[in-house]
Structure formats: C-alpha cells, structure tokens
Image (cartoon, rainbow, N blue to C red):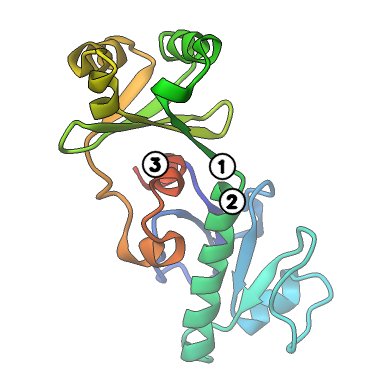
C-alpha cells in the first residue's frame, strides 16, 4: 500500500491513520512525500525556519503541530488539515470524462476500445446495478465514465462490455468503495473520480 505522507513523531507508541508513513527517526522519512512533525521539541530540531506562529510548511518544507499532550485541539485540527492537503494533492488534477457513445466521434470510440484492451494498468469500478462503470487510468490520471444502459440503447450488449473489461488481466475490478473512510469522504465528498485514484493508498 502506498503512503500519502510522512508523520515524524519520536513517540513510538502513538498510532496514526494507515495512509501515513509513521516515522520515529528522520532517517525513515520519505523525502518525496509531505511531512508533518509532531511536538514542539521535535519540530525545533527538524523544521526549517521554525516558528511558533506558523505551523504550515511552504515549498516542500516540513509542517508541524503540537503533540496531543501539548495542545489536543490544535493537534487534531492540524492533523486533519494535513491529511486533507495530502489527499487533494493526489486528486485535484484528475480529469473526468463521460463516454457519451451517441455523441462521441467514431475515431475516439475506437481509441477508447483499444485503450481498454491494452496493457496499461486500470482500476475499474462496476456499480452494483451493473449499469455504469468508471475506469481509472493511472498512467493518464484520467477517469472515464461509461453508461452501460446507454450502450444497450445503442445496441451494444453490456454483457459483452463487462466481459471485455474482466477478460483483460491489466484491469483491476472493484465492486465497492468501502475502502474510503468517513473522514476522507468528508474531504472529497461523493466524487467517485476522486475515490478511485486513492485506492492504492487505502488498500
């Protein structure tokens, strides 16, 4: 499972959400990810230009917050806001495109079919009623939406489409979005095209 961000907390007993890379030593921090430092003493050691009045890092600098036993309210608020920023960094540039078969140019439909049959790793969410499918391309950071009911209206059997999707070993099929916790849903709402890119960080 991928990690959204680092939390640097020298207290080894403190537990955090599984989406974080919890570190007790600076050597364990993944410098490619945003980092939140816990506790004033730890922040003084590792936060560049440390200030009691500015806890949010800029331009890749570490952010920091109080430990729970220092200021619980600020700790909880900063932790939530840090998670929110980390999540939005992953999803804010994801594009969503609805595949409207009757209005789509035939050339784009052919390209879409070729892509679905291709070797690119894709995450496919088949809705419970099997009348709509969302396809997430990790490579292109793009989510496609396809109405299977509309396909049937256009005389394209949805069973064949589902069979094609399932027959490609590069397509990961999921039937639910239960991996997204309530706190994360508060951040991204009901946007399925935001939920799919987060799959690798929650499962």
Q: Earlier in the sequence, mark 1 or mark 3?
A: 1
Q: Nearer the viewer, residue 147 or 102?
A: 102
Question: Could you tell me which secondary element the residue under label 1 belongs to?
Answer: loop
Image quadrant in which the C terminus is located: top left
Q: Nearer the viewer, residue 143 or 60?
A: 143
First in residue order: circle 2 vs circle 3 = 2
Outermost residue to the left: 129
* Label annotation for residue 199: 3
For this view, does 65 lie left or right of residue 127?
right
Residue at (22% x, 11% y) in the render? 160
Residue 122 x/y as whole percent: 42, 24
Q: Quadrant of residue 158?
A: top left
Residue at horizontal 40 percent and vertical 22 percent from the top: 102
**Residue 1, visible in the rendered structure:** no
Q: Position of residue 44 (x, y in %)?
A: 74, 78
Q: Is residue 49 above or below residue 187?
A: below
Side of 164 where 34 appears, left or right: right
Q: Can you give x and y, in whole percent of width and height, for residue 123 in the image? A: 38, 29
Residue corresponding to mark 2: 92
- Give the total of numbered labels: 3
Secondary structure at numbered mark 2? loop
Mark 1, residue position: 94
Regarding mark 3 in the picture, which secondary structure is present there? helix
Q: Nearer the viewer, residue 32 or 184?
A: 184
């Amino acid at each position: 499972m991928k990690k959204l961000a680092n939390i640097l907390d020298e207290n080894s007993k403190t537990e955090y959400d599984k989406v974080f890379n919890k570190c007790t030593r600076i050597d364990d921090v993944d410098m490619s990810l945003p980092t939140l430092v816990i506790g004033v003493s730890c922040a003084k050691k590792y936060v560049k230009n440390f200030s009691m009045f500015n806890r949010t890092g800029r331009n890749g600098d570490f952010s920091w917050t109080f430990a729970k036993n220092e200021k619980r309210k600020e700790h909880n608020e900063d932790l939530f806001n840090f998670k929110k920023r980390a999540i939005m960094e992953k999803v804010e540039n994801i594009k969503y495109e609805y595949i409207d078969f009757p209005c789509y140019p035939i050339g784009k439909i052919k390209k879409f079919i070729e892509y679905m049959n291709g070797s690119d790793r894709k995450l496919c969410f088949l809705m419970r009623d099997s009348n709509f499918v969302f396809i997430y391309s990790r490579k292109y950071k793009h989510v496609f939406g396809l109405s299977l009911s509309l396909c049937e209206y256009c005389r394209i059997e949805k069973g064949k489409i589902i069979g094609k999707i399932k027959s490609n070993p590069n397509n990961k099929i999921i039937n639910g979005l239960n991996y997204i916790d309530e706190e994360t849903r508060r951040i991204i709402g009901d946007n399925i095209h935001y939920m799919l890119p987060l799959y690798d960080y929650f499962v």
